[in-house]
Structure formats: structure tokens, C-alpha cells
Image (tube, rainbow, N blue to C red):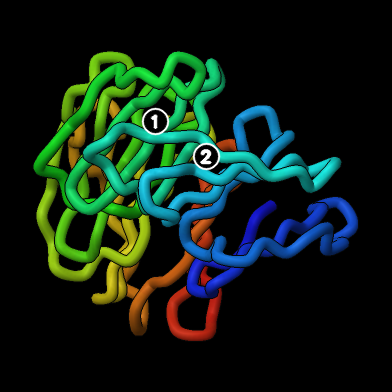
Amino acid sequence: AVFGRFEPEAVLVETATAKQLTRLKNGGRGATLSADGKRVLVAGNGKVIRTVDIMTGKESEISSSNDLYPERVRSLPNGDMLLSDHGRLERWDPRTEKRAWLVDWLSGPDLQVAPNAAWAVQYAPHGLSVIDLKKGKRKFHTYEDSFTSAQFSPDSKKLAITTASGLVLLRDAATGKALPASPELVGAVSHLTFSSDSKTLSAMSGDKWHRW
């Protein structure tokens, strides 16, 4: 696991033992694991993506397209990368250094990919967009002024959206249809997680966890 969302560095931790493996300077918000779990990918360094081999610590760089300055990066199972900046999302093949597609006029730059790798959500406090990753088309978009995070369920069927107003909103990930929201919680909702069967949600509001 990689931590360090609000810090100038990322910390790589072995989840089974909670052992700290390494610290990456200038990681922070833009760091994530590759789909194969062998590398840490770091965005937010201009037009390049830094890669760090977990076993050896060897660093290298991958160039992105000329007109994108990615702030977030996600790795897809086939080796492609999703690169996100403010308002744009690109699917990039680092082996051929070619763009598969670019979607503009989004919310961004925060980014999450569904477990089935069929769609992704790009979001900011004022709105979010769900993108079909095969077609490079926006599936649906919604506006709000208080989004704090977004998370797909393990079965990729639901999208949970946390807000500063004390609600967790649920959407059908494929259609965008609104599903029953959470009970109203006290204070901003900052974190949430689904159970492994996608039937239960746990969310942090204030300094307490709530489950339903």
C-alpha cells in the first residue's frame, strides 16, 4: 500500500506486517502501485511519470504526452496508464508512447479506477465524471459543491461519493442512477470503505466510523 496523500512524500508499507519498506520524496498525492504490484508510480513531476521498482529501489521515468501535466496516475491490467490533470483524463500506452484517447472538460484531478477496470471516476469538490475506459467516453457527470472522495464497490456495480455535508451518495456505476443515500451523518465524511461482498459501507464522519 502507498500512503502520503497530503504530504510531500509517499510511504510504501507491506500490508501484511505493517512494515515500512521505503519512503519516496516528492510522492504525495500522485503516488500509486502499478497493477502488477511491482512498481510505485509517481505523478506530479511535470510531464514525466516516475517509476520505482519495489524490490530494487531503481528509479526510471516514463514520458507522457506533450500537452498533459499529470497530477494523478493509475495503472491498468494491460499495462496502460490513466493520466489525470485538472479537467482532463488520458489513456496512455507507455510502451509505444501513444495516446489511446483523451477526455476533456472533466472535474479532476482526483482519480479512482473500478476493480473491473471498465470505468474510472475523476472528481473534485465541485463535481465528478465517470468514464468508460474502453471507449474513452463520459458515462455520466454530476455537479456538487462538497464532494470529498469517491470509491467503487469491489463488484464495480456501485459508486459511493462522500460529501462535506454529512451524506454518502450512492450511484449505479454503469448508469449513474441515484441509489438510496446513507443516513445523515454528523460533520464532513472523509473516508469510506466497502465490505468485500459490496453489501456494507463504513464511513468516517468527524472522528467516528459509521457502518450500514
Instruction: Name which quarter of the figure residue 120 lies in.
Output: top left
x and y, in percent, of residue 79 in the image: 54, 21
Numbered tag placed on residue 83 in the rendering: none
In the depicted structure, whether residue 189 falls above or below residue 133: below
| Element marked by disc 1 | loop
Q: Which residue bears the numbered disc 1?
A: 157
* Mark 2 residue type: Ser
Q: 10 Å neighbourhood of mark 1: few (<14), some, or many (≥20)?
A: some
- Above or below, 135 against 65 in this view is above
Q: Where residue 174 appears, x then y in whole percent?
A: 27, 26
Label ID, residue 198: 2
Look at label 1 and name its amino acid.
Lys
Foreground of the two, 76 or 118: 76
Q: Give whichever of 169, 38 is nearer the camera.
A: 38
Q: Residue at left 13%, top 61%?
A: 144
Instruction: Work out whether 47 lies above or below 167.
Output: above
User: Residue 67 occupies which quadrant of the picture?
Assistant: top left
Work out how far the residue at label 1 is from the one at label 2, CA to CA, in angstroms.
Answer: 9 Å
Q: Is residue 60 left or right of residue 177?
A: right
Residue 104's place in the image compared with 102, above or below, is: below
Q: Relative to residue 97, is residue 86 drawn left or right?
A: left
- Which residue corresponds to the image point at 28% horizontal and 68% vertical from the top-left? 163
Contact between labelled residues 2 and 1, with CB atoms less than 8 Å apart = yes
Residue appearing at x 13%, y 42% in the figure? 141
